[in-house]
Image (cartoon, rainbow, N blue to C red):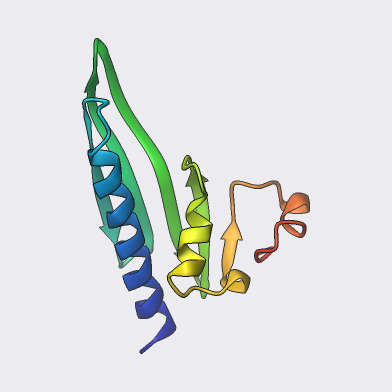
Amino acid sequence: MDTRLKYQSIIKNVLQSHADYRATLPDGYSSQVVFDDERGQYLVLDVGWSGNKYLHATPIHICLIVDKVWVQCDDTEEGIATDLVEAGIPKEDIVLGFRYPKIREYTGFAIA
């Protein structure tokens, strides 16, 4: 299987699991996944009302750029990159895009 297609499949499964878990939380909003294979964009969106506050947030944003998986936003407890590694994506193919470039070399993941 082509690496890009393999990574797309892994990302979708991991994000769907996160959205399903978030949907069980008693916060009153729903979690949705948005997949755009053509542009390599993958999101989890939290949308809805929690009490008297409206929520529209993107807790997870992942991009496929060339042959790397870029984690652009990660608002999870354990870290979405850990889940991607456990699902089969090597650390050297994951870039923590939300980390300052000079810090990335100390994360154990790809620099760029």
Image quadrant holding the C terminus, namely bottom right
Q: Residue at x 36, y 32 (%)?
A: 57
Reply above or below: 69 against 46.
below
Which x, y percent locates residue 71? 51, 55
Between 90 and 5, the residue placed more toward the observer is 90
Q: Residue at x 42, y 49 (%)?
A: 61
Q: Quadrant of residue 87?
A: bottom left
Between 43 and 85, the residue placed more toward the observer is 85
Reply above or below: 64 against 6.
above
Which x, y percent locates residue 59? 41, 40
Left or right: residue 48 compared with residue 88: left
Left or right: residue 73 compared with residue 21: right
Regarding residue 39, the answer to whether it shows in the image is no
Tell how many labels: 0
Left or right: residue 91 compared with residue 88: right
Which x, y percent locates residue 50? 25, 19
Q: Residue at x 35, y 60 (%)?
A: 14
Regarding residue 29, the answer to whether it shows in the image is yes
Image quadrant holding the N terminus, namely bottom left
Q: Which residue, as the protein is rendered here, is positioned at the far bottom?
A: 1
Q: Residue at x 31, y 67 (%)?
A: 38
Q: Quadrant of residue 107?
A: bottom right
Which x, y percent locates residue 94? 56, 65
Reply above or below: 59 against 7.
above
Q: Quadrant of residue 47?
A: top left
Q: Which residue, as the protein is rendered here, is positioned at the far top?
A: 52
